[in-house]
Image (spheres, rainbow, N blue to C red):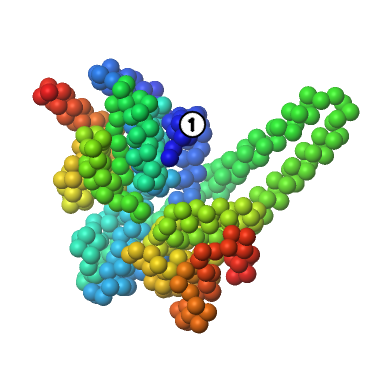
Amino acid sequence: MISATEATMVYDDGLTDEQVEARFEEIKLRFARSLPERIETCRQVLPAMCGSTPSAIEAVQTIYQLVHAMCGMAGTVGFTDVARLVRQATSAIADAHRAKRGMSEAECANVGAIIENLRISATRIVPDPAPGGSGDICMAASMRNTGQRLQEPLAHRSSTPDTGVHQDHAAAAMRILELFRTEGMAKTRILYIDDEECIREIAHFLLAREPDFDVRHCASGLMGLVESVNWHPDIILLDVVMPELDGPHTLQIFKAIQDTADVPVVFLTARFEPEDLDEYRSIGAAGVIKKPFVPTKLASQVRSFV
Amino acid sequence: MQARDGKKREEDYMNNMTAPMTIVMLDDNQDGLFLTKRRLRQEGFVNNVISEKDPARLFDLLDMISSTEGARRSMIILLDLNMPEANGIEVLQKIRKSNRYKDATVLMLSSSDDEADIMDALDEGADGYIVKPFRSDEFFAALSNVKSVRYQLVQAQ
């Protein structure tokens, strides 16, 4: 259930125009940076679309989702050329997508040509790394955040008599150190894919409380695929039994895509006997964690695969 | 920002409505949600937009709004058509099947301008369909269509 306070919070986000624009620029930048990878993924899945096999149908659905995800975003952030080409690609795939069929060679070639134009067009959108350019927005946001966190100890310091200053200096310094230790450290990125929401949230909670883990979760193999191409996880935890695209099929796609081919994928399953391990390994899994997982052990189990 | 201009238009719009309006939007993509919210903000809708990214929680949110403000505000639901977890059409069907919200005003928001997608949405009972990125005139056109629908309903009663 949603509490009244929670709803009030979303109701009025309290952002100033500047904050909204800064976030907009940040999203735009992140999207621009993710474009080459998104397009590369399309190019890699492209050949699989031809024909009438189940994997061709799956590839059509995958590419449709990939281009469609770019569609609204590209237009909204103002990349008009990219938006136009992505829309072309979406239309070219729409029929096959709706009919849940694979594509003919001519159709594939057509989509391929559009994607190639898209790739060229995307290379023209180069995020500006110069100081003061949009590349600094993420940094600025992070520094603002840091500043806010430091305000508290510093305010405390100014309100206490002189004798307390040294102590508070020390405390502030400790906080800064702590901040950089936890935020500056390269965290292990964990992507958790499971269709069951409550399990996903428990796993997220158990893993995210580890200071060196950065956790994201997705509800389906397809979403996991898109997320991993954009986010580059260090390890993927994958539920075996899921509707539509199940764990083993998702794994096959992960292994087929250059970006994710080397990322260890660990299956999570309730139906697991020790003798099954070899079978899971033979299709490319790094290992298996048995469900229901032991809350106190999950983090260390995950760590053993990184 | 065109906020000021938009605000005036919102006022004009509001003055013509019998009750102020709450826009409830559903999009499971956090960035997409923000971008749409930013566009609405540019159109002057600043404090009356509630967003939700989890389709499963939409009805909780609707219940909450209608229990606290239902009497005072009219509600427009903006549904993103393509959400990986739950298709927007399915959510629309659920709304149309529900006792409480079957008459709610629902606008579909989608990056697809595919005619088949638009027809599907209208067939399932959407009150309007807006292609992303939407232009102001399209958005307000969709809203005024809705308004006339509401007006006709009131006339008929």
User: In the rendered image, is residue A226 in sight?
Assistant: no
Q: Which residue is denoted by mark 1 in the rendering?
A: A5
Q: Chain of mark 1?
A: A
Residue found at the very far left of the displayed protein: B156
Q: Residue A256's image quarter?
A: bottom left
Residue type, mark 1 in image: Thr
Q: Is residue B123 left or right of residue A119?
A: left
Horizontal and vertical percent position of residue A75: 35, 45
SS of the residue at dot 1?
helix
> Where B9 sits versus B136, above or below?
above
* Quadrant of image for the C terminus of chain B: top left
Horizontal and vertical percent position of residue A117: 33, 60
* Quadrant of image for the N terminus of chain B: top left
Residue occupying image coordinates x 24% and y 61% = A97
Horizontal and vertical percent position of residue B38: 41, 35
User: In the rendered image, is residue A197 in sight?
Assistant: yes
Instruction: Pick whichever, A27 or A190, lies toward us.
Output: A190
Residue occupying image coordinates x 15% and y 23% = B154
Q: Is residue B67 left or right of residue A176?
A: left
Q: Residue A225's image quarter?
A: bottom left
Residue found at the very far top of the displayed protein: B15
